[in-house]
Image: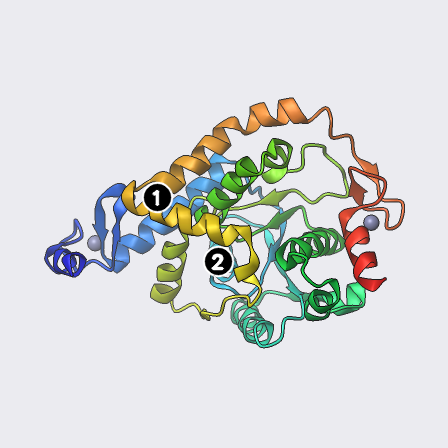
């Protein structure tokens, strides 16, 4: 109740009623000033991290969830100021009761914005839906399995669509979770690859994450304020992941120490150069002997995992 009371009395700096309180900045913002702040931060992230250039062909990994849908809209709005192309790439994992709804949103948003969309399906590309793989591989972690296949198909699909950049909807919360997970598992080499592959390969499409400094909650509020279609459905497999534990821990810490998520991600961005220098030399890239995609061992994780579930 204390929060509600303070929100009633609080005002945006313009005098209007606020729609959000930014704990980390100790600021109340009305709808107009929130949207303005959000758009400004989006553009600043792109320019500070040199994510976009004139003439780029950006493939947006569009799941139909709120983050990638907001990303698609925000990028589309930028085309008025900067000439570049946008194509959407959607991966259909084959998760019953979950995917159909988000796929519908993804298709509708592309139509609304006049953006061409390609859909790649797990079953067509690997012979199995994720639902079937989960049944067959039993107690394996579905998110790890799914993540390997999804990342592989996003990169391959983006390259086949002649992308110069692959834009992903990861928000501040996702990034902070991934950074902490890699530290808690003592996998600094993976941390070094988080932002971009350490070794350059013409077969890797450079990835950009323009929402990496945007808190998840703000994406949802932005989508509502702008009338962007979002659906509150969680992946039915999400509960199995270590990520869920880290997310809860980070949310609790953020509540007590506002700004923690920004600090985790900014610390990572600051260390990234050093991590790459340290782990770059060990990461000589080879080609997968089965599919030819870049990988660090003789056979890539995609081939290992899809063959195992097929065996
Ligand atoms: Zn205002
Ligand atoms: Zn392979």
Q: Residue 256 placed where, x, y %?
A: 28, 43
Residue 241 position within the rendered picture, expressed as x and y whole percent measured from the top left: 56, 55
Disc number placed over residue 210 in the picture, else none: none
- Mark 2 or 1: in front is 1
Q: CA distance from mark 2 to mark 1?
A: 22 Å
Helix, strand or loop at disc 2? Answer: helix
Lateral position of residue 139 relative to residue 260, left or right: right
Please name the residue shown 45% across and 31% down the image: 267
Looking at the figure, which quarter contains the C terminus?
bottom right
User: Helix or strand or loop: what does disc 1 sit on?
Assistant: helix
Q: Is residue 269 left or right of residue 199?
A: left
* Quadrant of the snapshot with the N terminus: bottom left
Q: Nearer the viewer, residue 13 or 26?
A: 26
Q: Which residue is mark 2?
A: 67
Quick one: 295 or 108, which is closer to the camera? 295
Residue 287's place in the image compared with 160, above or below, is above
Q: Earlier in the sequence, mark 2 or mark 1?
A: 2
Residue 303 position within the rendered picture, expressed as x and y whole percent measured from the top left: 81, 52
Residue 240, by quadrant, is bottom right
**Which residue is tagged 1?**
253
Q: Sort mark 1 into few (<14), some (14-19) or many (20+) by Cα contacts within 10 Å.
A: some
For the image, the number of numbered tags is 2
């Amino acid at each position: 109740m204390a929060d509600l009371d303070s929100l009633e009395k609080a005002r945006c700096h313009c005098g209007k009623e606020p729609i959000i309180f930014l704990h980390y900045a100790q600021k109340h913002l009305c709808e107009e000033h929130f949207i303005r702040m959000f758009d400004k931060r989006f553009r600043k992230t792109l320019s500070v991290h040199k994510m976009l250039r004139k003439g780029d062909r950006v493939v947006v990994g569009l799941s139909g969830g709120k983050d990638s849908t907001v990303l698609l809209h925000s990028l589309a709005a930028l085309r008025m100021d900067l000439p570049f192309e946008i194509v959407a790439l959607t991966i259909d994992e084959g998760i019953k009761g979950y995917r159909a709804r988000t796929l519908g949103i993804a298709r509708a948003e592309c139509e609304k914005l006049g953006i061409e969309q390609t859909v790649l399906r797990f079953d067509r590309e690997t012979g199995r839906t994720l639902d079937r793989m989960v049944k067959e591989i039993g107690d394996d972690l579905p998110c790890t399995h799914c993540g390997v296949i999804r990342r592989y198909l996003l990169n391959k699909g983006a390259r086949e669509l002649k992308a110069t950049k692959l834009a992903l909807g990861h928000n501040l919360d996702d990034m902070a979770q991934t950074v902490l997970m890699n530290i808690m598992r003592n996998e600094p080499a993976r941390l070094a690859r988080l932002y971009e592959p350490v070794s350059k390969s013409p077969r890797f499409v450079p990835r950009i994450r323009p929402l990496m400094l945007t808190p998840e909650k703000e994406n949802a509020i932005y989508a509502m304020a702008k009338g962007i279609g979002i659906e509150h459905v969680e992946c039915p497999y999400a509960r199995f992941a270590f990520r869920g534990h880290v997310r809860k821990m980070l949310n609790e810490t953020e509540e007590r120490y506002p700004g923690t998520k920004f600090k985790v991600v900014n610390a990572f961005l600051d260390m990234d150069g050093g991590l790459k220098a340290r782990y770059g030399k060990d990461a000589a890239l080879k080609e997968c002997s089965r599919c030819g995609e870049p990988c660090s061992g003789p056979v890539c994780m995609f081939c290992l995992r899809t063959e195992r579930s097929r065996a």
